[in-house]
Image (tube, rainbow, N blue to C red):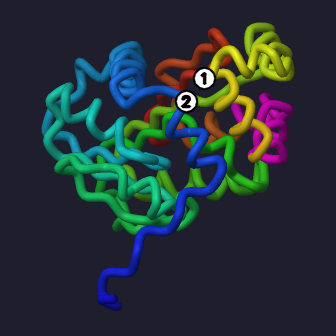
Amino acid sequence: MNAANPPTPEPTAWEKAYLRFETPGQEIAKFISRLRLLGADSWPRDAELVEIFCGRGNGLIALEQLGFTRVEGVDLSPALLAQYTGKARTVAADCRRLPFADASRDILIVQGGLHHLPEIPGDLETTAAETARVLRAGGRFMIVEPWDTPFLRFVHAVSNMGLARKLWDKLDAFAVMTEHEATTYFNWLGRPEEILAVLRRHFEAEHCSVRWGKLRFLGRRR
């Protein structure tokens, strides 16, 4: 065995569920739709972008398909990063300690990762401050995260039904992910005012909306 190239770690139960939640094509299309909704069509194509919690890299592919040429990805999981085969540079790192210089990037993006942070609002405060540190003046921070709405509560209720999970693999994958991240996930859902306060303390909101169980936020560095 070559010590310089250790084997990729076996995916965790959560990672395996994430990989079957939706196909890469479905996830890429979803990410493109979100990016366009939050104004990505008007962003300079040579902007330096970083997607945090990039997972298997479909968000990076979405950015590439939209024409962005300077894209990077960060995720804590080497197993998920190993799934990505595109051109963007990727690095395994913690969002609370980003491996980038001060004021060195234009846009940072998170599509479903902040709710994994173990301590809210503390870790979110650290992540937001770290993001602001990395962004250039006027740089943007975009997030899409789960949010406590009647629709999301309905999905949770259905995902607790054994028969529904047997009939719909996507729902079962969602339920498995929820079970494995329950502590952080429900802590996130239960702290909407604190979360918004942190975001607005570090970023001037250009867009902030809640729909279909998701928070969509785009802000400029203060």
Q: Is residue 70 left or right of residue 132?
A: left
Q: Amino acid at mark 2?
A: Phe
Percent position (x, y) of residue 79?
46, 60
For mark 1, what is the residue? 170
Crowdedness of circle 2 by 10 Å Cα count: few (<14), some, many (20+)?
many
Q: Residue at x 31, y 49 (%)?
A: 84
Query: Along the line of sight, which residue is nearer the eye, 153 or 174?
Result: 174
For mark 2, what is the residue? 21
Q: Earlier in the sequence, mark 2 or mark 1?
A: 2
Query: Along the line of sight, which residue is nearer the eye, 19 or 91?
Result: 19
Give the Cα separation between the discs numbered 2 and 1: 5 Å
* Badge 1 element: helix
* Badge 2 element: helix
Q: Is residue 21 left or right of residue 180?
A: left
Percent position (x, y) of residue 158?
81, 14
Q: Amino acid at mark 1?
A: Lys
Cβ atoms under marks 2 and 1 closer than 8 Å: yes
Q: Tag count in the figure? A: 2
Q: Quadrant of residue 214?
A: top right
